Image (cartoon, rainbow, N blue to C red):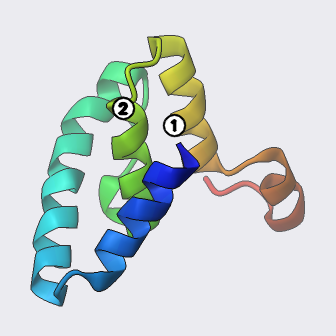
Amino acid sequence: MLRILTALTLLAATAPASAQTGGVANIRVHLAQELPIYGFRDVDVSRLSSSQVLQIEQIIHSGREDSNIRSRIATVIEGGLLQRLIFGERR
């Protein structure tokens, strides 16, 4: 999974700016439709960083069980335990 995220990050960093904007914008539209399925109805997709958008997209299409997908998405959106302790809640 780390390799896929690294590859997506490198791809996003090397793509032309117009392609990055269109690609991430399209993914945001997709996430706005998919996140409610996994119980994230109150997430404002426009406030997610490009990195979060790409991570969540990869998680959704990972082929894992729904409960595993839910917990991984929550970690990306809310941050891990250490991030929450240092920076506080993101919500």
Does the rendering let one see residue 41? no
Secondary structure state at the residue bearing disc 2? helix
The kind of residue tagged 1 is Ile
Does the rendering let one see residue 62? yes
- Estimate the spatial distance between the alpha carbons at disc 2 and disc 1, rounded to whole Å: 8 Å
39 and 42: which is toward the camera: 39
With 38 as the anchor, is 30 left or right in this view? Answer: left
Q: Are marks 2 and 1 in contact (CB under 8 Å)?
A: yes
Q: Residues within 10 Å of mark 2 (few under 14, many from 20)?
A: many
Tag of residue 73: 1
Q: Residue furthest bottom?
A: 17
With 12 as the anchor, is 80 left or right in this view? Answer: right
Q: Position of residue 3 (x, y in %)?
A: 51, 53
Q: Residue at x 89, y 56 (%)?
A: 85
With 86 as the anchor, is 41 left or right in this view? Answer: left
Residue 31 sits above or below residue 25 on the image = above
Q: Position of residue 81 (x, y in %)?
A: 82, 46
Mark 1 or mark 2, which is nearer the start of the sequence?
A: 2
Q: Position of residue 37 (x, y in %)?
A: 31, 21
Q: Which residue is mark 2?
A: 60
Residue 17 sits above or below residue 61 on the image = below
- Circle 2 or circle 1, nearest the eye: 2
Q: Residue at x 10, y 70 (%)?
A: 22
Q: Residues within 10 Å of mark 1 (few under 14, many from 20)?
A: many
The kind of residue tagged 2 is Ile
Q: Residue at x 56, y 19 (%)?
A: 68
Q: Position of residue 48 (x, y in %)?
A: 42, 61
